[in-house]
Amino acid sequence: MSALAILARARDAGVNIAVDGDDLLLTAPAQPPAAIVDLLAQHKHELIALLRPCSDDWMTEDWQAYFDERAGIIEYDGGVSRPEAEVRALDACIAEWLRRNPVRGSSERCLRCGGATRSDDTLLVFRGDSAGAWLHVQCWLAWSSHRNAEARSALAAMGLGSQGNS
């Protein structure tokens, strides 16, 4: 279950969630259902990443300039066509977005499934940024695909990755 789906279930149960540093603050008019509390605990780090304000201080214009600069360098220095240069420039923007929007994880829980180290699948840190993304090897591909889609979506909302952005 995704963090967004868990957040929706919690809110449907009357639980309001806020972030305080590396903790979730829960408020509710009555004791939340144990199943909701368990889901929140299992996916705490993913929920914090979802609810925490974005650390990226670039505006749309900054992203467009970054994209245009990368596409120009790739086209002229790399000797490739403009459409191919734009595909590669978008890949560079995705990598930069991921770098500027790291997730914080714990060495105790997988960011994707919320599980601890298993005998058949140890938790490893991926993406060597300062935050660290702790995942089971078996969870990495789905998590990485989700993060890349998240980056594409954020960039598309700024007009990057669509036709006519050069």
Image (cartoon, rainbow, N blue to C red):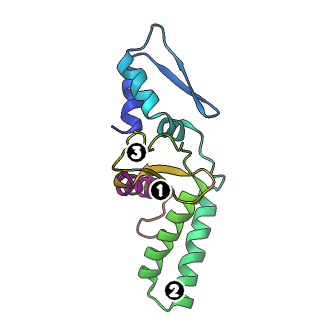
Q: Residues within 10 Å of mark 2 (few under 14, many from 20)?
A: some
Residue position marked by numbered label 2 in the rendering: 75
Q: CA distance from mark 3 to mark 2?
A: 37 Å
User: Foreground: 20 or 42?
Assistant: 42
**Which of pointers 1 and 3 lies earlier in the amino acid sequence?**
3
Q: Position of residue 131 (x, y in %)?
A: 60, 50
Q: Is residue 146 above or below residue 91?
A: above
User: Foreground: 61 or 130?
Assistant: 130
Q: Position of residue 60 (x, y in %)?
A: 59, 57
For residue 138: magenta?
no
Q: CA distance from mark 1 to mark 3?
A: 17 Å
Residue position marked by numbered label 3 in the rendering: 112
The total of numbered circles placed on residues is 3
Which residue shows up at 43% across the image and 32% down it?
42
| Residue 165 visible within the image | no
| Residue 20 visible within the image | yes
Q: Contact (CB < 8 A) between labels 1 and 2?
A: no
Residue lying furthest front: 119
Type of amino acid at the residue the image marks with label 2: Glu
Determine the secondary structure under disc 3: loop
Determine the secondary structure under disc 2: helix
Q: Position of residue 72 (x, y in %)?
A: 56, 82
**Which of pointers 1 and 2 lies earlier in the amino acid sequence?**
2
User: Foreground: 84 or 130?
Assistant: 130
Q: CA distance from mark 1 to mark 2?
A: 23 Å
Residue position marked by numbered label 1 in the rendering: 151
Highlighted magenta segment, given as a residue range: 139-150
Type of amino acid at the residue the image marks with label 1: Ala
**Which of pointers 3 and 2 lies earlier in the amino acid sequence?**
2
